[in-house]
Amino acid sequence: MTQQGQQPQPGTGGSGPDKTAMDQGMRALSYLISGVLLYGALGWVGDHFLHTRFLLPIGIVLGAAFGIYSTIRRLSVTDLDSKAGTSVTTKEGGR
């Protein structure tokens, strides 16, 4: 018994795909930032104790590379799961 022109209630849908895309974007950003910070910090500690100057930049570059790798790997798994879910639904719907 819905009336035409009635606004959808918050949290009952309407922004599902946008919310999922925002979650994936925030997850990708967090992987990149955490990779750079973690490996940069490890490089800084290595530079501090070994009295060198090259481990910090190497740590930052490796952290960025690892963050990109983690993002691609995680989002491709999510994409494969969503494709597998649609194919299973199609098979069941065809019965």
Image (cartoon, grey):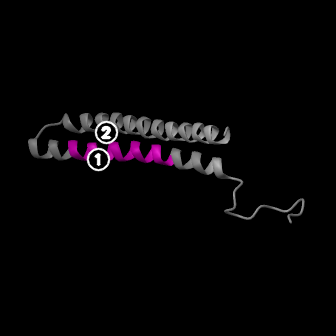
The circle drawn on residue 38 is: 1
Instruction: Out of 26 and 84, give the one closest to the viewer.
Output: 84
Q: Position of residue 51 (x, y in %)?
A: 10, 41
Q: How many marks?
A: 2
Q: Residue furthest front?
A: 95
Dot 1 lies on which element?
helix
Range of residues picked out in magenta:
26-43
Please tell me whether residue 14 belongs to the stretch shown in magenta. no
Instruction: Out of 66 and 12, give the one closest to the viewer.
Output: 12
Q: Position of residue 58 (x, y in %)?
A: 25, 34
Q: Position of residue 11 (x, y in %)?
A: 67, 62
Quarter placement of the N terminus = bottom right
Dot 2 lies on which element?
helix
Which residue is at 36% across, 47% downward?
34
The amino acid type of the residue labelled 1 equals Leu
Per the model, the C-alpha gap separating discs 2 and 1 is 7 Å
Q: Residue furthest left?
A: 50
Residue 70 horizontal side relative to residue 11, left or right? left
Which residue lies under the disc numbered 2?
63
Instruction: Out of 73 and 36, give the one closest to the viewer.
Output: 73
Please tell me whether residue 32 belongs to the stretch shown in magenta. yes
Q: Position of residue 2 (x, y in %)?
A: 86, 64
In the image, is residue 7 above or below residue 66?
below
The circle drawn on residue 47 is: none
